Image (cartoon, grey):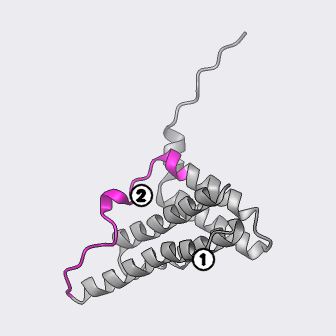
């Protein structure tokens, strides 16, 4: 994975975290998403400024949600149409694959497990197993 693709993964992880907050509110624990962004940066040597931008997206949404609870009329950091609220199975699989590819580059089992935990969470949040069950097996021909 090249740095550009790793930055793209960080952005996708940030959007997943923001989407979760938009759906479930300010009490959503996004630490797993922020940690995954940091670990992705570490694994692929992403410049710190790019990693910080992705984490900042989540932090800004947290602030917005608290301000909304206080009665302020403020927009989310991203429109709902820009969030992976109903990601396709293929999009979810791409995220999970990239997370696994990143995990194997990390030296500590604890760090790899953090990314594995996020991959499982994405699978659950995006109903990946439902999508897999709905897919038809390709027709096979016998020679």
Q: Position of residue 110 (x, y in %)?
A: 74, 76
Q: Which residues are magenta?
A: 71-92
Q: CA separation, marks 2 and 1?
A: 25 Å
Instruction: Give me the disc on residue 48.
Output: 1
Mark 1 residue crowding within 10 angstroms, few (<14) / some (14–19) / many (20+): few
Residue 77 highlighted magenta (yes or no):
yes
Q: Which mark is residue 84?
A: 2
Which mark is in front, 2 or 1? Answer: 1
Is 64 left or right of 130, judged from the image as shown? left
In the displayed image of the protein, which residue is found farthest to the right? 107
* Left/right of residue 83 with respect to residue 79 in the rendered view: right
Which residue does the image show at 76% across and 62% down from the upper left? 104
| Residue 114, position as x, y percentages in the image | 66, 72
Residue at far top of view? 143
Label 2 Cα crowd, 10 Å radius (few <14 / some 14-19 / many 20+)? some
Depicted 62 relative to depicted 97: above or below: below
Instruction: Answer above or below: position of 79 versus 24.
Output: above
The residue closer to the viewer here, 47 or 132, is: 47
Q: What's the magenta bit mostly, secondary-structure-wise?
A: loop
Dot 2: element: loop
- Residue 57 position, x and y percent, is 43, 74
């Amino acid at each position: 994975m090249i740095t550009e693709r790793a930055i793209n993964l960080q952005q996708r992880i940030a959007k997943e975290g923001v989407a979760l907050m938009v759906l479930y509110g300010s009490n959503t624990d996004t630490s797993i998403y922020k940690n995954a962004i940091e670990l992705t940066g570490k694994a692929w040597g992403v410049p710190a400024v790019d990693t910080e931008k992705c984490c900042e997206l989540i932090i800004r949404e947290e602030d917005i949600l608290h301000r909304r609870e206080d009665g302020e009329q403020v927009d989310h950091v991203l429109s709902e149409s820009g969030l992976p609220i109903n990601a396709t199975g293929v999009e979810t699989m791409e995220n999970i694959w990239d997370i696994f590819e990143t995990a194997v580059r990390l030296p500590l089992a604890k760090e790899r497990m953090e990314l594995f935990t996020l991959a499982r969470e994405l699978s659950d949040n995006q109903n990946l197993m439902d999508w897999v069950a709905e897919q038809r097996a390709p027709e096979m021909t016998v020679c």
